[in-house]
Image: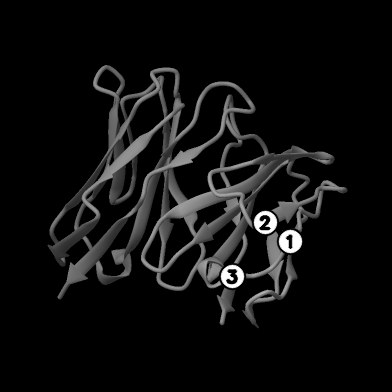
Amino acid sequence: GENVEQHPSTLSVQEGDSAVIKCTYSDSASNYFPWYKQELGKRPQLIIDIRSNVGEKKDQRIAVTLNKTAKHFSLHITETQPEDSAVYFCAATGKNRDDKIIFGKGTRLHILP
Amino acid sequence: NAGVTQTPKFRILKIGQSMTLQCTQDMNHNYMYWYRQDPGMGLKLIYYSVGAGITDKGEVPNGYNVSRSTTEDFPLRLELAAPSQTSVYFCASSWSSGGGVYNEQFFGPGTRLTVL
């Protein structure tokens, strides 16, 4: 079955700098890769996703890149702000309707003042 | 739309007690999920359902049971509570799991359970 590895588990960056979180997946049939953000004490919420027919997607300060050959995808946050402090989860799922979504273990991002 | 709602928000159980965590969604989603999140850890799938009357085990089903008699409701039953079940429990729903579109999972606010 699918396995999703996420690195690093903890990341601290200076406010204004960029943050990058990386994930690898094992099933080459996976074709949908969402990222969820969970603020302290809150529920996870989808912030961006990418499908296997594109290599990059941007939404303001966040972007996701996908390398299907290497089976890895990354979340990039530019010009980090205090409100970016949270736990970020990557995930992967396949092309069939009933394919289960598999989450990575999460990255705790600290934005330092 | 209220989205995904969960009750209760907090609960303290004694070892050996039982309880049901309620989850309801009003988005007409077929897929519903139960996750547990231990402190500082990731999401572990307990059970999921692909539609009314159909449920299946996830990664950590032991000590839990579920039922899905309607599209809207997906209760999680804890029998004989143990300290190892102390966790935050999230219910989620989605239109589909894999495939085409509408894969986004919408999470409820969570239930914080402590077993003493």
Mark 3 and mark 2 residues within 8 Å of each other at the beta carbon: no
Residue under pointer 1: B77
Q: Is residue A100 left or right of residue B20?
A: left
Q: Earlier in the sequence, mark 2 or mark 1?
A: 2
Residue B26 position (above or below residue B89): above
Q: Are marks 2 and 1 on the same chain?
A: yes
Residue in front for this viewpoint, B58 or A90: B58
Which residue is at 26% across, 71% downward? A82
Cα distance in 3D space between marks 1 and 3: 13 Å
Is residue B78 left or right of A9 when viewed as pictured? Answer: right
Residues tagged 2 and 1 counted as in contact (Cβ below 8 A): yes
Q: Is residue B6 above or below residue B102?
A: below
Q: Secondary structure at mark 1?
A: strand
* Residue A66 visible in the displayed image: no
Which image quarter: residue A27? top left
Residue beneath disc 2: B64
Q: Quadrant of the C terminus of chain A?
A: bottom left
Q: Secondary structure at mark 2?
A: strand
- Residue A16 position within the rendered picture, expressed as x and y whole percent measured from the top left: 15, 63
